[in-house]
Image (cartoon, rainbow, N blue to C red):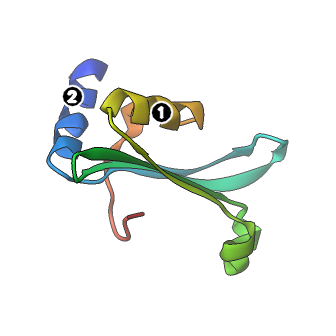
Amino acid sequence: MSHQNEELVWKKAVERGRTRGYECMRPKPNAPEKQEFIQYAMRKKDGSYQAYFFAVDPQDVHIVEDCAEEELLTFDDFDKALQYLCSRGADPARFAPFKGQKPF
């Protein structure tokens, strides 16, 4: 399956109101020797696209309310929502159904 077809599959799921995205560990942008937990997600709700970004240092998980960066933005267009997530470092090829707890 090509990259374009894979993206089309998860885009169709988002169009049906399903949540798609992924979570991972990555180097912190301002301190590459440290890691941070990242979560990206997208869904369509009430005709708009919600893009979700979350980042926290794993050492600060116990005080996530004080230390995490969390954004939930709404867009009228799928491509604009995806562009925002990509600007935060998301890789659209990794978007898939969430296992366990969903971000929304």
Amino acid identity at mark 1: Asp
Q: Earlier in the sequence, mark 1 or mark 2?
A: 2
Q: Residue at x 36, y 27 (%)?
A: 79
Residue at (18% x, 42% y) in the render: 15
Q: Quadrant of the C terminus?
A: bottom left
| Residue type for callout 2 | Leu
Please state which of residues 52 and 37 is positioned toward the viewer in this rendering.
52
Q: Is residue 45 above or below residue 78?
A: below
Residue 8 sits in which quadrant? top left
Dividing the picture into quarters, in which one does residue 103 lie?
Answer: bottom left
Residue beneath label 2, please?
Answer: 8
| SS at mark 2 in the image | helix
Secondary structure under badge 1? Answer: loop
User: How many other residues sit within 10 Å of disc 1, few (<14), some (14-19) or many (≥20)?
Assistant: some
Q: Residues within 10 Å of mark 2 (few under 14, many from 20)?
A: few
Above or below, comparing residue 8 to residue 53 in the picture: above
Residues under labels 1 and 2: Cα distance? 14 Å
Disc number at residue 91?
1
Q: Which mark is residue 51?
A: none
Asked if one can make out residue 2 in the rendered structure from this viewpoint, the answer is no
